[in-house]
Amino acid sequence: MARTKQGTKSPFDSTTTKRLVAAVLLCLFAFLHLSQWGRSQENTEQEINNVVEIHIKEDLCPTAKRFGKGAEGGWYACDPNTLTAKPCVVYSFGIKDDYSFDQAMHDAGCQVHGFDPSPYGLKSKPKYEAIGGTYHSVGLGLADSEVKVAPFRWPGIGYLKDRNTDPWVLQRIPTIMKEVGHSYLTYLKVDVEGAEWDAIDDILAANWGEFALEMHFPPKEYTITRKSGSSTVVIQRGDTPFHEPAEPTWLDRIPLVTKLLAVADVWKVEPNFKDKHCMNVYFKRR
């Protein structure tokens, strides 16, 4: 046994030293383990925030019917029987030169209102009104305002880069519904080439039964896949946000999709075979 010069026991004999070393190593191991666990949790949360899964309830609408053209321009309705209920009100944002869906919904007995301030949509206004629809020269926006440049968040289509000879009038959905005189929409269709994301919060707050939306995702930032053998669509964002040329301020689509899924069920998803970063998504309000 180790002793001091005075012949007493040393406070740091071999047994005590071993215990101290063991205690230090145990604390160090615990610290490293907790640090690694913390980083793992942080990475897991980041992965969750970067991904949203759409689970399609394909059996929710057994009597679904397509209205309008078979390809681009046509849209499905979950329950065609609701269209015979009075009043049946349809808002259709994004007309351009194809209004076959609007005409079919009008023929089914609905009040149809079309919204498109673009030069391409305005050319269709006389024919749109001839089929019995009400045409509004305003677009869907984050605020009630006028803009001189197409307000789209989508760089994939060349004609959207065109500037307009006249300013576009944009309005929020609450403003439009109040001015037109509606408190409930039987069917809301939005196909506005990326501008839909600015209006999602207003869409969530609006009172509607069915909602058909063409979602647009920046191709250099998001990937869209469908799980093999399942009815699940996975939307994933890259770790580093990529600023698209057409996007004035960066906007994360993942939480916006998550908000929609919290209030409505998806019963159908139509991929765009020309562009894998677009898809038509059909919602039914719970």
Image: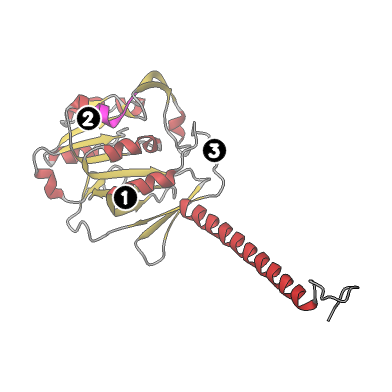
Along the polypeptide, which appears first: circle 2 or circle 3? 2
Q: Residue at x 19, y 59 (%)?
A: 62
Figure check: 210 above or below 90? below
Are the two marked residues, 1 and 3, in contact with CB atoms closer than 8 angstroms?
no
Q: Amino acid at mark 1?
A: Ala
Residue farthest to the right, as pictured: 5
SS state under label 2: helix
Q: Residue at x 38, y 47 (%)?
A: 257
Figure check: 210 above or below 234? above
Crowding at mark 1 (Cα within 10 Å: few <14, some 14-19, many 20+): few
Q: In the figure, is residue 29 to the left or right of 116?
A: right
**Where is residue 32 shown, x and y percent of the image?**
64, 63
Q: CA distance from mark 1 to mark 3?
A: 27 Å
Residue receiving disc 1: 262
Are the two marked residues, 2 and 1, in contact with CB atoms closer than 8 angstroms?
no
Magenta-drawn segment? 169-177
Residue receiving disc 2: 177
Residue farthest to the top, as pictured: 166
**Where is residue 144 shown, x and y percent of the image?**
33, 24
Report the coloring of the rendering: secondary structure
The residue mark sitting in front, 1 or 3, is 1
Residue receiving disc 3: 243
Along the polypeptide, which appears first: circle 1 or circle 3? 3
SS state under label 1: helix
**Where is residue 256 shown, x and y percent of the image?**
39, 44
Q: Residue at x 44, y 50 (%)?
A: 276
